């Protein structure tokens, strides 16, 4: 979903705020965002069809608060779970809701 589409959607669809998931991947210094649309997660892209990247949660807040979005789900993903009980690699993921 393009950022311009998200902005338009929020203006037209009064009161309905989509679920926004900000993902942090182990070993990466930036955050990516996905927006739930028709029960599917769509990556947030700019007008050049590039993924929108954030350097901090503060940047996420600066973008979303003016649009009326007051909370997001922060998803931390670490595919290399060293503490796996069976010793195998797992899809270790932790979700938490944060207020903007």
Image (cartoon, rainbow, N blue to C red):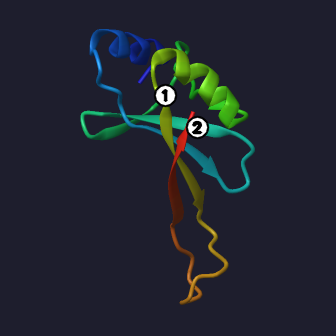
Q: Residue visible at 45% across and 12% down?
A: 4
Q: Residue visible at 55% across and 14% down?
A: 48
Q: Residue visible at 37% across and 10% down?
A: 8
Neighbour tally class for label 1: few under 14, some 14-19, many 20 plus, Cα within 10 Å: many
The reply to whether callout 1 and callout 2 are in contact (CB within 8 Å) is yes
Q: Position of residue 20 (x, y in %)?
A: 44, 36
Mark 1 or mark 2, which has the lower sequence index?
2
**Front position in the image: 8 or 2:** 8
| The quadrant where residue 22 appears | top right
Q: Residue visible at 39% across and 14% down?
A: 5
Question: Which numbered marker is on residue 32?
Answer: 2
The N terminus sits in image quarter:
top left
Q: Please, is residue 64 above or below residue 4 in the view?
A: below
**Front position in the image: 49 or 3:** 3
**Front position in the image: 66 or 41:** 66
Q: Please, is residue 38 above or below residue 24 in the view?
A: above
Q: Position of residue 83 (x, y in %)?
A: 64, 81
For the residues labelled 1 and 2, the Cα–Cα distance comes to: 8 Å
Neighbour tally class for label 2: few under 14, some 14-19, many 20 plus, Cα within 10 Å: some
Q: Please, is residue 15 above or below residue 79 in the view?
A: above
Compared across the picture, whether 27 is left or right of 10 comes to: right
* Secondary structure under the numbered disc 1 in the rendered image: loop
The C terminus sits in image quarter:
top right
Q: Position of residue 39 (x, y in %)?
A: 26, 40
The total number of labels drawn is: 2
Question: Which numbered marker is on residue 10?
Answer: none
| The quadrant where residue 59 appears | top right
Q: Which residue is mark 1?
A: 44
| The quadrant where residue 18 appears | top left
* Secondary structure under the numbered disc 2 in the rendered image: strand
**Front position in the image: 34 or 67:** 67
């Amino acid at each position: 979903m393009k950022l311009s589409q998200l902005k338009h959607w929020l203006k037209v669809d009064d009161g309905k705020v989509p679920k926004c998931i900000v993902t942090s991947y182990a070993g990466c210094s930036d955050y990516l965002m996905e927006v739930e649309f028709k029960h599917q997660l769509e990556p947030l892209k700019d007008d050049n069809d590039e993924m929108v990247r954030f350097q901090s949660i503060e940047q996420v807040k600066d973008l979303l608060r003016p649009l009326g979005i007051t909370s997001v789900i922060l998803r931390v993903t670490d595919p290399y779970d060293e503490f796996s009980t069976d010793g195998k690699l797992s899809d270790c993921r932790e979700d938490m809701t944060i207020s903007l």
